[in-house]
Amino acid sequence: MAMASLRTMALAMLMISSLFFHSSYASSDDFLRCLSASIPNKLLFAQSSPRFPSVLASSVRNPRFLMPWTARPLCIVTPTNASHAQAAVVCGRRHGVRLRVRSGGHDYEGLSYRSVQPGAAFAVVDLARLRSVRVTRGPHATAWVDSGATLGELYHAVGKASGRLAFPAGLCPTVGVGGHLSGGGFGMLLRKHGLAADHVVDAVLVDAKGRLLDRSSMGRDVFWAIRGGGGSFGIVLSWRVKLVPVPPTVTVFTVAKSVEEGAVDILAKWQEVAPALPDDLFVRVLVQGQVATFQSLYLGTCDALLPVMRHRFPALGVNRKHCKEMNWLQSVAYVYLGAGATVEGILNRTSSMDAVFSKATSDYVRRGISRDTWAEIFTRWLARPDAGLMILDPYGGKIADMPESATPFPHRGGVLYNIQYMNFWEGANEEAARAGWVRDVYRFMEPHVSKNPRQAYANYKDLWLGENVVGAGAIRSFEAGRVWGEKYYKGNFRRLAMAKREIDPDDYFSNEQSIPPLAVQLILTNMAQVDRSY
């Protein structure tokens, strides 16, 4: 079935289900009246609105979450200024309606716009209308970027402002800035410049009381938490980020190697080489079917790149024919959209992949996987007709130089690379097999990846890792949250829960994998245990 028809079918089902769910939310009228008193009606979309289905679907990236049985919001608020977001919080608190916040809609589990729990009373604050980017050039160049902007819009504004400036974030230009920075954010510049969140120097946050806070007024611990802690602390409307220098010319290459051409041996060698290359050089791998595709960005010319590759990674066989020289902004379009792409292409807020069902999860590798294991992965897992792909991003360099506690993102020194397992399909009847492949290969990989905890990347959200349990007073349990939370954040999970207690003790901004507030009793117990140890 064509991708466009799949999306049309899902949208039609959404319109039908909106009528069904509306009757069960008659008690939401007071909430909607409260919103209407402070927010123009043209920015509010209740379930009874003819535009509700299309606005909800506008940045849904996975049709799995447009099915009729999906719990959906009472309404969608599309603010154009901070006061609208503040009003949504005040009205939500007053009338018992929680808020979920959506910037680009790429949440892998759709938790920015849907609830796993049927009958949940929630609304969505969709930040797509807040998308400005304001670049300040100079020796300490920065940009203020709204959460509803996409990475493509940010990259385009930065690249047009100066051919020698960039921002180190993800590959996909349709990803929303707000969600990306909230989870850490990494891409082709991670070895040279680290995470996107490492470069946040200020932010504007609406908290659970409806207050508008900046870095100073939100406090050190909350500012630390919003830079990679998963978006559980309020509505971040905008971010001030440091921009980074890049040379006027960068070089990209793509080299594909089949199993018959030695992919297994080359991939086994890549694990050793890629994390130890000069920081200016990033070589990732897409492993699909019987082919490993090596994709690279080098901050320099082809003439400078080739000696490095010949000396450090001769097995890949990179030569001048593989090199494509361009500026950094052009490389963003080339890497994601292909050889014929233009820089204007990264301004599109949607892509053809938005109509495809998908499932993903992630791992971290701290010790190289044996050649025999890679051979088995190709023959046993990637040769299956229902197989997906594995994406391997090397670490080392700047991302590894910072301590684990610098930001909530803890996957720093000692990490060789991140693995993302993904699969795609075009019909709901394929989900069992296609998602099953992801689950099966994840189980197979357990002996070969990080342990205690088995680490995962928060921006590759996966509810298979665990979900929150609601405790007394409708507050999520910290102990239950540790099951998934320590996989994403390791020891930083506790500090995140303490920051949550400080800014949102009633757990208003919550979902199936939001940070739970650490109860006062647990803090006192921990302090007592420390005292007894002395």
Image (spheres, grey):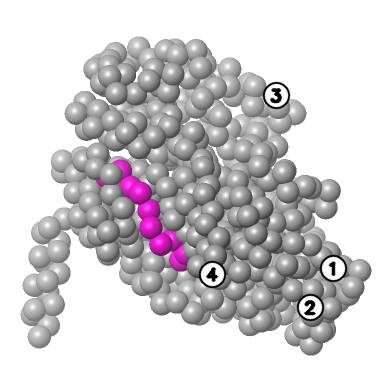
**Majority SS type along the magenta span:** strand
**Other residues around mark 3 within 10 Å, as few (<14) / some (14–19) / many (≥20):** few
Inter-mark Cα distance, 2 to 4: 27 Å
Residue that mark 2 sits on:
305
From the top left corner, tell me how far across and down residue 64 is, in percent.
Answer: 55, 34
Residue visible at 76% across and 68% down? 249
- Which residue is disc 1 drawn over? 323
Disc 1 residue type (three-letter) = Cys
Mark 1 or 3: the one toward you: 1
Mark positioned earlier in the residue sequence (4 or 1): 4
- Tag 2: amino acid: Leu
Q: Amino acid at mark 4?
A: Pro
Question: In this view of the protein, can residue 122 be seen by the observer?
Answer: yes
Per the rendering, the mark at residue 139 is: 4
Labels 4 and 1 touching (C-beta < 8 A):
no
Of residues 355 and 502, the one nearer the viewer is 502
Residue 322 in percent (x, y) is at 87, 68
Left or right of 283 on screen, residue 10: left
Amino acid at pointer 3: Ser
Determine which residue is flagged by label 3: 5
